[in-house]
């Protein structure tokens, strides 16, 4: 049988098919990798067994919510919220609760950068039972003795006087002020004899707002919970299957491609079928020619 050479007009289409096959194969490989990588639990110091919506800094970014990245530094868990670093004292995933303390206040209240404690309220809320405490730095001589005084050097002023009061307040006659949350009952339990360092060191609780319920269905179907950074939403990573659905082996969500989520026909197989059909058609054209 006479074999005809591939005509030039068909060559670009063949290249296109090959590129599609390679791309689909790589995408499927990425999903498989995420299914494995996102299955690892975060363990650091006395905080263990943590997973979605958190992720460890050594995991792919898709393994957790972008605002819930945990760092392990010398067996101490840390998280950054609005450019302020915190130590994580406890994580209770059953109640969606974090216990945090300011990293810059560790061991001392004489800090270098005077930044208020502020949360990303799209991700967190303060737990009940807390109120603000204001620390004043670089204050002029107070004139009369008042409770809860301390001394700290402040750049730009010779004044080292400082004190703190309940409530969120501006610096007033002092150089700067910093607002931190404290447990309300702590202030009244200890009275005038406690140091501000100890009340800040105890930390405060926040609750996160990221819905973790969808993760249960994903896990039960054999998937790994993660986050779609492009769509900005929860994603379920499944072995040998494209994600896009809340669970593995489920029907595609509204508006999504059935090929993307099909559990029975993989993207590579679909591409191979497409390539096979094209080659059959091309052979027929060659014979006719």
Image: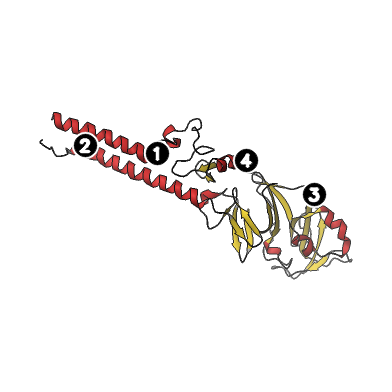
Residue 85 visible to the viewer: no
- Residue at point 85%, 65% (across, down): 142
- In this rendering, would 111 be left or right of 260? right
Asked whether 152 or 11 is in front, the reply is 11
Residue of label 3 = 129
Badge 1 element: loop
Residue of label 2 = 10
Image depth: mark 2 or mark 1 in front = 1
Residue 10 visible to the viewer: yes
Image depth: mark 3 or mark 4 in front = 4
Image depth: mark 1 or mark 3 in front = 1
Image depth: mark 4 or mark 1 in front = 1
Q: Could you give the CA–CA distance between mark 3 and mark 2, rounded to whole angstroms?
A: 72 Å
Which colour assignment does the render follow?
secondary structure
Q: Could you give the CA–CA distance between mark 3 and mark 4, rounded to whole angstroms?
A: 26 Å
- Residue at point 84%, 57% (across, down): 187
Q: Could you give the CA–CA distance between mark 4 and mark 2, rounded to whole angstroms?
A: 50 Å
The label on residue 213 is 4
Asked whether 75 or 207 is in front, the reply is 75
Counting residues from the start of the chain, the first of labels 4 and 2 encountered is: 2
Counting residues from the start of the chain, the first of labels 2 and 1 encountered is: 2
Residue of label 1 = 266
Residue 83 higher or lower than 5, as above or below: below
Quadrant for the N terminus, please: top left
Q: Quadrant of residue 282?
A: top left
- Mark 3 crowdedness (10 Å alpha carbons): few <14, some 14-19, many ≥20: few
Quadrant for the C terminus, please: top left
Q: Could you give the CA–CA distance between mark 1 and mark 3, rounded to whole angstroms?
A: 52 Å
Counting residues from the start of the chain, the first of labels 4 and 1 encountered is: 4
Counting residues from the start of the chain, the first of labels 3 and 2 encountered is: 2
Badge 3 element: loop
């Amino acid at each position: 049988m006479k074999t005809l050479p591939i005509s030039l007009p068909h060559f670009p289409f063949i290249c296109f098919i090959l590129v599609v096959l390679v791309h689909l194969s790589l995408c499927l490989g990425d999903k498989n990798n995420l299914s494995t990588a996102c299955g690892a639990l975060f363990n650091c110091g006395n905080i263990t067994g943590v997973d979605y919506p958190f992720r460890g800094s050594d995991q792919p970014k898709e393994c957790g919510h972008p605002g819930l990245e945990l760092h392990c530094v010398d067996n101490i868990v840390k998280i950054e919220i609005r450019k302020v670093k915190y130590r994580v004292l406890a994580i209770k995933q059953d109640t969606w609760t974090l216990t945090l303390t300011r990293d810059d206040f560790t061991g001392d209240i004489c800090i270098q950068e005077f930044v208020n404690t502020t949360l990303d309220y799209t991700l967190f809320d303060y737990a009940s039972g807390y109120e603000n405490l204001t620390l004043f730095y670089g204050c002029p001589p107070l004139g009369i003795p008042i409770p809860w005084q301390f001394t700290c050097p402040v750049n730009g002023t010779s004044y080292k006087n400082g004190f703190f009061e309940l409530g969120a307040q501006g610096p007033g006659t002092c150089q700067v002020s910093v607002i931190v949350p404290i447990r309300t009952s702590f202030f009244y339990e200890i009275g005038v004899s406690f140091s501000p360092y100890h009340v800040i060191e105890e930390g405060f609780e926040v609750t996160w707002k990221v819905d973790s319920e969808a993760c249960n269905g994903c896990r039960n179907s054999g998937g790994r919970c993660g986050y779609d950074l492009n769509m900005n939403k929860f994603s379920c990573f499944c072995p040998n299957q494209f994600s896009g659905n809340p669970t593995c082996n489920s029907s595609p969500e509204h508006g999504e491609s059935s090929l993307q989520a099909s559990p029975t026909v993989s993207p590579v197989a679909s591409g191979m079928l497409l390539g096979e059909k094209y080659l059959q058609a091309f052979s027929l054209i060659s014979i006719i020619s």
